[in-house]
Amino acid sequence: MLVMIYNGESFNIKTKEDFKTLMIRSAISGFNGMAASFFQMYLPLTVYYTINSSSTIFTFVLNYFLYGIPITSHQKKAVVISMVGIVLVINGRSIYQLLDSSY
């Protein structure tokens, strides 16, 4: 919302297609919240938080493929850096073993 205010964009939904897209995104977000509360009880918290924090990256990439929203070079770099960070977090123990064989 703050980005829309900064860019001077309108909050008005002009077409039925915009409304439909907004409702689909809201439903997915709601489902994500319900699934997150369910899986939080069954997955280790480190795995849960890694999956949950990476969901915004996948949403970003899916918007590119599904809706054709252009991605700038800075955004591409940010996605790559984020994915590298996620891989490092997921493989933390393996990285420690590579650096220190007594771990």
Image (cartoon, grey):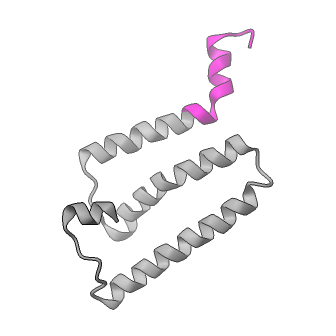
Task: Say which of 22 and 86 sits in front.
Answer: 22
Report the residue at 24% width, 76% height from top: 10
Position of residue 103 in the picture relative to residue 32 (left or right): right
Residue farthest to the left?
8
Is residue 59 within the magenta segment? no
Position of residue 2 in the picture relative to residue 41 (left or right): left
Q: Position of residue 7 (x, y in %)?
A: 20, 63
Report the residue at 25% width, 45% height from top: 73
Is residue 89 within the magenta segment? yes
Report the residue at 74% width, 14% height from top: 103
Q: Position of residue 79 (x, y in %)?
A: 40, 44
Task: Say which of 84 and 1 sits in front.
Answer: 1
Position of residue 63 in the picture relative to residue 27 (left or right): left
Task: Read off the magenta span.
Answer: 88-103
Residue farthest to the right?
42
Quadrant of the image occupied by residue 89: top right
Task: Say which of 70 and 7 sits in front.
Answer: 7
Q: Position of residue 59 (x, y in %)?
A: 46, 60
- Is residue 25 shown above or below 94? below
Q: Is the magenta stretch mostly helix, strand or loop?
A: helix
- Is residue 41 shown above or below 20? above
- Is residue 60 shown above or below 12? above
Report the residue at 75% width, 62% height from top: 38
